[in-house]
Amino acid sequence: MMRPRILVVDDETPFVGEHLKHILGEDGYDVEVLSDARQALDRLRTRQFQLLLTDYKMPEFNGMDLLSAVRSEGLPCGVILLTGYGDPELVRSVMKAGADDFVTKPFDPDRLRMIVRRTLDQRRLIDELEQLRQDLEQKYHFHDMVSKSPKMRGVFDLIKQVGPVGSTVLIQGETGTGKELVARAIHASDTRRSGPFVALNCAALNESLLESELFGHERGAFTGAERLKKGRFEMAHGGTLFLDEIGEISSAMQAKLLRVIQSGKFDRLGGGEVSVDVRIVAATNKRLEDEVKAGRFRQDLFYRIAVIRVELPPLRERIEDIPLLAMHFLEQFAGKSVPAVTEIQAEAMQALLEHRWPGNVRELQNAIRTAVAMADGSAIHRESLPPTVAPQRAHAAMKAPLINIDRPLRELTGELISRVERDYFTRQLALFKGNVARTAKQSELSRRSVTQKLQKYEIDRTRFKQEKPN
């Protein structure tokens, strides 16, 4: 593991600089000390440092000049300023200029260590988010979807496999999981991708309007029908018709839809028979198998539309995707803000990982859109997020840094997710006195999944049996 490199700049060396080198060296950092700010800038240009610790008051080229040069040139390091002044106005100007933090001299070694650790945490997060940004472009994109989750990668593989087949597809998943994006990906993978993709939300229309939308009508077919109108089936001829919320249609409409799927023909309202060549992709947030058992959905229609089934996992079952998706949406919305929002701070990302996301990917997308609009500066802070996602925390201790700088991080998300999951299951087991069944129900996972998590994180559930709930 490479030790973090810190460059200390102070014109009072060897006194202050060597003292800092001793303190930080004890913590395992690789510390270099210089007394000239211009020389330090040249050093930063030629060697990679994770942190710059510079005195504020120096002759000619001072700490603020060095900070401005580092930020304007985009040199990738955190910056802490040392100042002998505690003036709030000075502190504000230092932070506004792009410093990550400041330390007032004479400094307390323990406070200095804490600020250095926190700044390195933030710097590592920035570096890892930049890597995520690159990964978005290279590895995790599939059409307009983004994922590294094994479950979603399985969905992508299934789409590649069944896209060219032409069979009807049923997509099942909770609201907001991206069913239309999957339908569009299936269409794009089909041999008929040059044809139209037509979508219709079946739950948004009553039965008579739905029939007119699907099958169209002739002029004069009913009062107000002043011209011929093609329905969605005709509009989708040679392409794909996406029927969202198909579980909401009436029994009568189910029968008419079954006929079209079986024969490729339907009757336009007030007119004759029409033939079409359309691939149907349907979606629902219901379990249609249960609807069939309850007599609310035709079994023969179910088997017709579910030749191929795609199950979309909720976002809470693929939390490794949250940082990727958050950065993906940030890329979408950042250009619409002034100044441009380009970063997500550590505490904001922690809040995103801790949230349960009942609205799934759509809720995350809206949260990032809101955060970009509310951001004060170029970064999304925890306070920028909607209160439903990041409520005010009851205790300051919960603001502890998420990242352990003593561990190597090959990938940011693995570290963040492990920390959140370990803490989550520890708290749940404490609440339910070690009861795995109740923990599984609360977390909306299977008992097997919870047991695997406990084994992974070496959490002994028996030690919670006699503990009082938190």
Image (tube, helix red, strand yellow):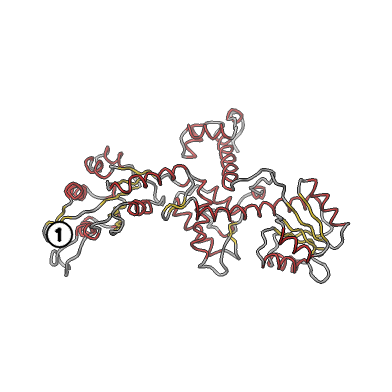
For the view shown, which residue lies furthest in the bottom direction? 60
Mark 1: which amino acid?
Answer: Leu
Q: Is residue 14 above or below residue 416?
A: below
For the view shown, which residue lies furthest in the right direction? 15
Q: Position of residue 92 (x, y in %)?
A: 71, 67
Apparent side of residue 14 relative to residue 386 in the rendered image (left or right)? right
Q: Position of residue 306 (x, y in %)?
A: 28, 43
Q: Residue at x 73, y 52 (%)?
A: 5
Looking at the figure, which quarter contains the N terminus?
Answer: top right
Which is nearer the eye, 133 or 246?
133
Looking at the figure, which quarter contains the C terminus?
Answer: top right
Q: Position of residue 53 (x, y in %)?
A: 76, 58
The residue tagged 1 is: 269
Secondary element under disc 1, as helix, strand or loop, is loop
Q: Residue at x 87, y 61 (%)?
A: 12
Q: Is residue 370 visible?
A: yes
